Amino acid sequence: MSEFSNRVAAQRRVLQIVNSREWNGERLFGLSRNAIDRFAGSNNLDPTSGLLKLIESASSKLFFLANKSQEQVSEEYEALSADVAHIADELEIELRSF
Amino acid sequence: MHIYAFGSICRGEIDSNSDLDILVIGGEYPAQYDPAIYSVYSYERVRELWKEGNPFAWHLFLESRLLFASDGRDFLHSIDQPAPYKNYANDCEKFFSLFREARAALNTASRSIVFELSTIFLSIRNIATCFSLGVSNHPDFSRNSAIRMGSESVPLCDRVYRVLERARVLCTRGRGQEITSDELKAAQESLDAVYHWMNQLVERARAHERV
C-alpha cells in the first residue's frame, strides 16, 4: 500500500507539472495511455515531441512498478522511483521551452 | 501461461463504463504483454498475493474465470484459497489517507482536477471493497461497491457519484466529457460527508480487528 501511495504521489507530481501550463486544449487527465493520447490529440502535440516522450516514459515506469514482485521490487523500485522523479525534473525544464 | 477474465464481465455487470479485465499469469515476468491492456503478473507475485490474503487475491479467487491454460489446469483454483484478509483496518486507513490527500489537493486549487476526483472515486470504492471483505463478510468487488452497502452506502447523491465515476474513466481510459466547474463545486461540497463516512468505516474496522 505504501508503494501504491507513492505511485499516486508520483503521478500527482507529473500531472501538476504538465498542467501548470495553460494548454489550448484539455489538460492531462491521467497517465494511462488513452489519457495521454487524448491530451496529445486535444493539444495537437507532435507524437515524437520530447514532452510526450517524457510523459510516456513516466507512465510506463509507474505501470511497470504496479505489477512487480515485492522481492524483485526493493532495489529496482528505488531505481525506478528515482527515474520518475528525474523525469519530472526534466518535464519542468522541457515545459519552460515549450 | 494462464489467462483469466475477471471483474464486471464475470459478474454480468457490463455497462458503457465497463472494460474487459484480463489477467495474464506468466513466467518470471511476462513482459511481452502490454500492461496497459492486460493485468500482467508472474506466478511468484500471484503466490505472494495469496500468502498476504490480499483483496485482489480474493477477488481473483472468487470471481475469475479461466480462458486459457498452457498446461490444461486452472492454476488459480488449483492452489489453496488465499490466506484470511487481516489487513483490512490498515487498508481502510490508507484509502482514507489517499482520500484526504486528494481532497487537500483540490482545496489548494490543483489544476489536475480530473486526477484528484478520480483518486477520490478510487479511495471510496476501495475502502468499501476492503470493508466488505474484511468486516461485513459480504465481499463486493464491483466498481459500485460503495453504493451497494444499503443504509451504510457512501452519502453521495447520484449526480456527484457519477461525476466522480466519470473522472475515474477519464483518468484511466481517456473517455468521456470533461468535468465542468459546476460539477467540481458540487463534488467538493459533498466531500465533508464522505470524510465522515470513511472515518466511521475506519473506526468500525479498527473495532472489528480488536474483537
Image (tube, helix red, strand yellow):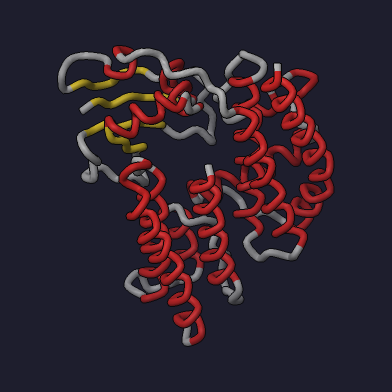
**Furthest residue to the front?**
B210
Report the residue at 40% width, 24% height from top.
B50
Rendered view: B136 above or below B165:
above
* Image quadrant containing the N terminus of chain B: top left
Q: Looking at the image, which residue is at 59% across and 20% down?
A: B133
Residue sitting at x 83%, y 44%: B192
**Can you give x and y, in whole percent of width and height, for residue B198 in the image?**
75, 35
Q: Is residue A4 left or right of residue B92?
A: left
Q: Nearer the viewer, residue B28 or B62?
A: B28
Is residue B1 placed above or below A9 in the rendered structure? above
Q: Nearer the viewer, residue B69 or B48?
A: B48
Asked whether B165 or B24 is in front, the reply is: B24
Q: How many badges with numbers are in the image?
A: 0
Q: Is residue B194 above or below residue B147?
A: below
Q: Is residue B147 left or right of residue A14?
A: right
Q: Quadrant location of the C terminus of chain B?
A: top right
Question: Image check: B111 left or right of B11?
Answer: right
The answer to whether B177 appears left or right of A3 in the picture is: right
**Residue B17 seen anywhere in this rendered image of the structure:** yes
Residue at x 41% of width, y 74% of height: A51
Up-down relation of residue A91 to residue B114 (above or below): below
Query: Where does residue A50 sit, x and y in percent of width and height?
Result: 37, 76
Q: Residue furthest bottom?
A: A97
Q: Position of residue A98 (x, y in %)?
A: 47, 83
Residue B135 in the image, given as x and y percentages of width and height = 66, 19
Mark yes or no: residue B157 visible: no
Tell me where residue A71 sits by quadrant. Answer: top left
